[in-house]
Image (cartoon, rainbow, N blue to C red):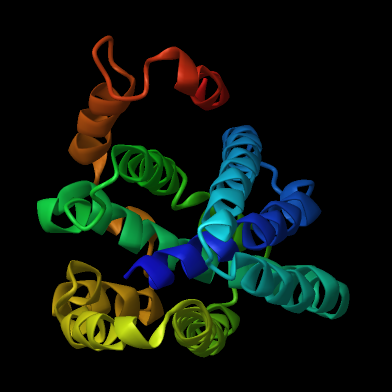
Amino acid sequence: MSHLVAVLSAMFPNGEEFFVNSVRNCRHQATDPELRKQVNHFVGQESMHGRIHRDLNSRLAQLGFKCHLVDRAVDIGFNRVAAKVLPDSVQLAITAALEHYTATLAEVMLSDPSAQALFDQDGVRCLLLWHALEESEHKAVAFDLYQAVNGNEVLRRVAMNVITGVFLGGLALGTALSAVSSSSPGEVPSLLGSLARLPRSPFLSPTVLARLRHYNHHGFHPDEFDTTALLQHWRIELFGSEGNLTDGRSQSRSQARR
């Protein structure tokens, strides 16, 4: 699980740079002022996520996780290849699809105590909860922008199906390489036990998998899954007067949210 989370964190900085650029490239085509405002908020939040995860990745690298390999692969695949050869509409469709993944996993993190309990370090747990909160807040922005500037249902579904293979394949390969390259022979039994428990993870429940597949339904929209109450709870929990992220160390994150 530690290797899996490290690989996910390593994917975020360059992945979210791709997200930001894909919405920026299409922002001028949006005629709705409210949507443009939401896109601006999306860009600010995603940019902050990338910076914070770079800090986390530096610490993970010090602990022996091979974050730089995944970080480099995502940069080449998304920012140096896909961003150069794919039309803007396809890049935006990819972003909307991956935002469905991040929002779905984020809302598991926010709603399931067993998911939160997987992270026993307060700092890491709070960082992931903060990231999850903002992913859920802007889960419909890239999708709405895509619908406004293109809206092709076939392209939307094809992008989701292709990116599912790329994302899950890359995640599995990166996790395996991280585990093999960072672990000693004495840790093999622990790794195998962790692997055996992985299918029972709250992030891989049948409900979660069904929700991910729901993206391909005709007429789908991210707001079909109402998280208003969940978001309100975590805004107070993390940023209220007694919240977990209201001390001086997290001031920059609070300012970024505002």
Depth check: 100 or 73 in front?
73
Classify residue 133 as left or right of residue 37: left
Q: Is residue 121 above or below residue 221?
A: above
Q: Which residue is rendered at x = 19% and y = 73% of the image?
A: 201
Q: Is residue 39 above or below residue 75?
A: above
Q: Which residue is rendered at x = 23% and y = 26% of the image?
A: 237
Q: Is residue 201 visible?
A: yes
Query: What percent of the width, then of the height, locates residue 78?
Result: 73, 73
Classify residue 175 as left or right of residue 227: right
Q: Which residue is rendered at x = 55% and y = 49% of the image?
A: 59
Q: Is residue 151 visible?
A: no
Quarter placement of the N terminus = bottom left
Q: Which residue is rendered at x = 25% and y = 32% of the image?
A: 234
Classify residue 25 as left or right of residue 207: right
Depth check: 254 or 147 in front?
254
For this orientation, the residue located farthest to the top is 241
Query: What percent of the width, then of the height, locates residue 202?
Result: 17, 68
For this orientation, the residue located farthest to the right is 84
Query: What percent of the width, then of the height, locates residue 176?
Result: 46, 87
Q: Residue 215 lies in what quarter of the image?
A: bottom left
Q: Is residue 240 above or below residue 130?
A: above
Classify residue 193 as left or right of residue 176: left
Depth check: 234 or 161 in front?
234
How many tags in the picture? 0
